[in-house]
Image: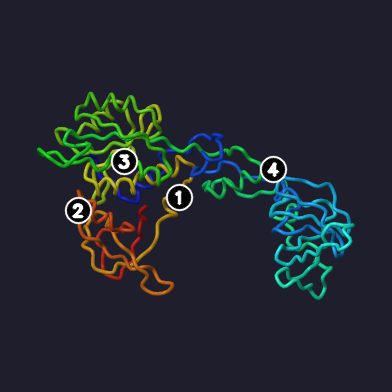
Amino acid sequence: MSDLTTWARARRAAREAAGALPVVEVPLAAAVGAVLAQPLVSATPLPPFDAAGMDGWAVSGPGPWTVVGELLAGQVLDRLVDGAAVRVATGAALPAGADAVLRRERGLLEEDPHGAYGAQLWVGDPVRGLRAPHPGYVEPGTDVRARGQECAAGEHLLEAGGVVTPVVAGMAAAAGYDALPVVRPPDVAVLVLGDELLERGHARDGRVRDALGPMLPGWIAWLGGRAFPPVRVPDTLAALLDALDDANADVIVTTGSTAAGPADHLHAALDRLGAHWVVDGVAVRPGTPMCLATLPDGRHVLGLPGNPLAAVSAVLTLAAPLLAVLRGEAGADEARVEQAVLAVDVTPHPEHVRLVPVTRRRAEPGGDPAATPTLHAGPAMLRGLSLADGVAVVPPGGGARGSGVAVLPLP
């Protein structure tokens, strides 16, 4: 292994190793979670017409009003003449001539004793049957959702670069869109290396359960990638070369085989394929032998150490910045970094950054939270990480109680 890269420089190298993937137009549901590639401009006024804001009656002019019919959402009426009212449901398009909406709970209906007209509508108390002091007056515009109240046609609703949330997809639909232009999320292949790993059942005969295969797709999804189902690869150079060749993805994540043991073939395979080494070992504990390389065809290979906590360290160090750039969200990994103070002394490493699972609690209003390391946080352990809500970045020689640290949040 070459000289180790510092933790901060490794993250920067991962960020600079790639660019945003191409822009694609996808249906609204498929756009959720992707990054908007162009500004969202409303294709229609919102609301597109004057609409009822409440259930009740659309009224025209002063009252009393003669009820001339009923108008449900999705129905239209050309015009409402003075002195007339029409029953409306929330969201119904108001006819021309409608001044206001009289809410159902404020409308008093009185039948015409002569039967010559429809029911007479007054402002009043329908429960007690009493008219209001001014029973023929409703303030114009009351409970009317005016056309263009939210936005006009052609108005910018969102700038490019933000993540399409479910709310954004709904707003785009309301604004007249069936699809959105987004940066294509990165496809990620996961290659699980290690003949000692079991896919199911209890550990036995010197073999252990594979923890990374079930875990990594969720991590990748949290970082904005699309993981393919993990593929198991035998511990031979030929099998690894074939698996790397077959992996049709923007990023290939491998588990294990990053060190220099007799069954560790990743370096030899990448050298054989003519890969460009971006990061080959990082001065961080756990996870020192993590690596990142780019194949001649542009695919990126991220090598995670086989120990579970060390693998998570590599995900936070290299995968987070790499996937953020590929999905068009450059710098998003840095934006997620939070601050805390250590609640206890943490044993530092003299030369390497330590990534330490922690739980945080707010110490005082307005202050940074206090971070306490979890137990059971060895490189091969996940128990401590499962209890943590973040990973503290303890610099070389740091770790004193009360000192400030950066914290990488966890899913």
Instruction: State the colouring used for the structure image.
Output: rainbow
Name the amino acid type tagged 3: Val
Rounded to the nearest whole Å, what is the CA distance between mark 3 and mark 4?
46 Å
- Mark 1 vs mark 2: give the one in front: 2
**Horizontal and vertical percent position of residue 302:** 32, 38
Q: Kindly state the secondary structure of the residue where label 3 is placed.
A: strand
Neighbourhood count class around disc 4 (C-alpha, 10 Å): few under 14, some 14–19, many 20 upward: some
**Residue 103 vertical position relative to residue 237 in the rendered view, above or below:** below
How far is the residue under mark 3 from the one under mark 1?
Answer: 20 Å
Please state if 78 lies on the left or on the right of 396 as rendered. right
Q: Please give the name of the residue rendered at 42% of the width and 40% of the height, measured from the top-left corner.
A: 225
Q: Which mark is residue 43?
A: 4
> Which quadrant would the N terminus be assigned to in this image?
top left
Q: Distance between the residues labelled 1 and 2?
A: 28 Å
The residues bearing labels 2 and 3 have C-alpha atoms spaced at a distance of: 24 Å
Residue type, label 2: Gly
* Image coordinates for residue 383, horizontal then vertical, percent: 23, 54
